[in-house]
Image (tube, rainbow, N blue to C red):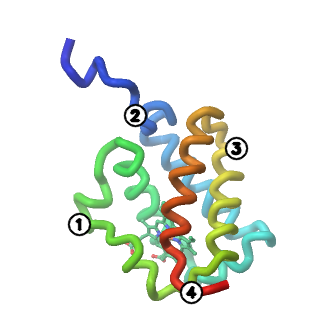
C-alpha cells in the first residue's frame, strides 16, 4: 500500500472533490447575490462576483487538501493583506459565515465535515476583520 492510501481522507475527498467545491462556491455567491439578509456582505463586493467565485473556488481546493489551484496561479494567498482594501467588521464576518453555513447545508455537505469546516472558516473569517464594529 502506498503511504498516502493509508492516510485518512482529506476534507476535499470527504466533500466529494472538484465538482462539489465548485458547487459549494457557486451556491455561496448565488446566496450572497440574491438573499437580502446578506446585503451588507454583498455591498463590500464589486458589481460582479465572477472573479470572487473563481478565486474562492481555487483557494478552497487547496485549503481543503485538494489541488493547490490558487497558489499555482497567484502565489501565496496573503489573505488578510488582500482583504485590507475592504472594510470588514463583525457584521461582514457574521454574514460571510451565515452565508457559508447556508451554502454548506443546501449543497448537502456531510454533517461531520460541516461542523469541522465551520470552526475553520470562522477562524479565517475572524482573522480577516480589519475594523471595529
Ligand atoms: C470575513 C468576511 C469576508 C469578506 C467581507 C470578504 C470579502 C472579499 C472581497 C470583497 C473580495 C474581492 C473579490 C473580488 O476579487 O472581486 C474577496 C476576495 C477573496 N476572499 Fe474574501 N471575504 C471574507 C472572508 C473570506 C474568507 C473566510 C475566505 C477564505 C476561507 C476568503 C477568501 C477569499 C479569497 C481567496 C479571495 C481572492 C483574493 C485575491 O486573489 O484577490 N474570504 N473577499
Q: Are marks 2 and 3 in contact (CB under 8 Å)?
A: no
**Split into 4 quadrants, where in the image is the N terminus?**
top left
109 on left or right of 3: right
User: Based on the displayed image, in which of its 4 quarters is residue 45 positioned?
Assistant: bottom right
Residue 31: x, y in percent?
Answer: 70, 61
Q: SS for tag 2?
A: loop
Q: CA distance from mark 2 to mark 3?
A: 19 Å
Q: SS for tag 3?
A: helix
Residue wearing tag 1: 75
First along the sequence among labels 3 and 4: 3
Q: CA distance from mark 3 to mark 4?
A: 29 Å
Residue wearing tag 4: 131
Name the residue: 74% across, 68% down. 34
Residue wearing tag 3: 105
| 43 is higher (above) or lower (below) than 78 | below
**Eye-nearest disc, 1 or 4:** 4
User: Based on the displayed image, in which of its 4 quarters is residue 80 positioned?
Assistant: bottom left
Residue wearing tag 2: 10
Amino acid at each position: 500500500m502506498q503511504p498516502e492510501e493509508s492516510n485518512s481522507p482529506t476534507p476535499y475527498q470527504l466533500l466529494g472533490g472538484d465538482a462539489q467545491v465548485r458547487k459549494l462556491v457557486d451556491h455561496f455567491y448565488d446566496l450572497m447575490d440574491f438573499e437580502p439578509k446578506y446585503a451588507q456582505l454583498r455591498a463590500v463586493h464589486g458589481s460582479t462576483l465572477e472573479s470572487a467565485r473563481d478565486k474562492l473556488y481555487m483557494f478552497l481546493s487547496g485549503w481543503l487538501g485538494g489541488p493547490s489551484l490558487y497558489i499555482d496561479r497567484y502565489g501565496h494567498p496573503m489573505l488578510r493583506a488582500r482583504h485590507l482594501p475592504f472594510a470588514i467588521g463583525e457584521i461582514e464576518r457574521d454574514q460571510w459565515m451565515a452565508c457559508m453555513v447556508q451554502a454548506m447545508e443546501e449543497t448537502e455537505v456531510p454533517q461531520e465535515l460541516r461542523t469541522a469546516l465551520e470552526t475553520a472558516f470562522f477562524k479565517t473569517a475572524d482573522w480577516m476583520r480589519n475594523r471595529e464594529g
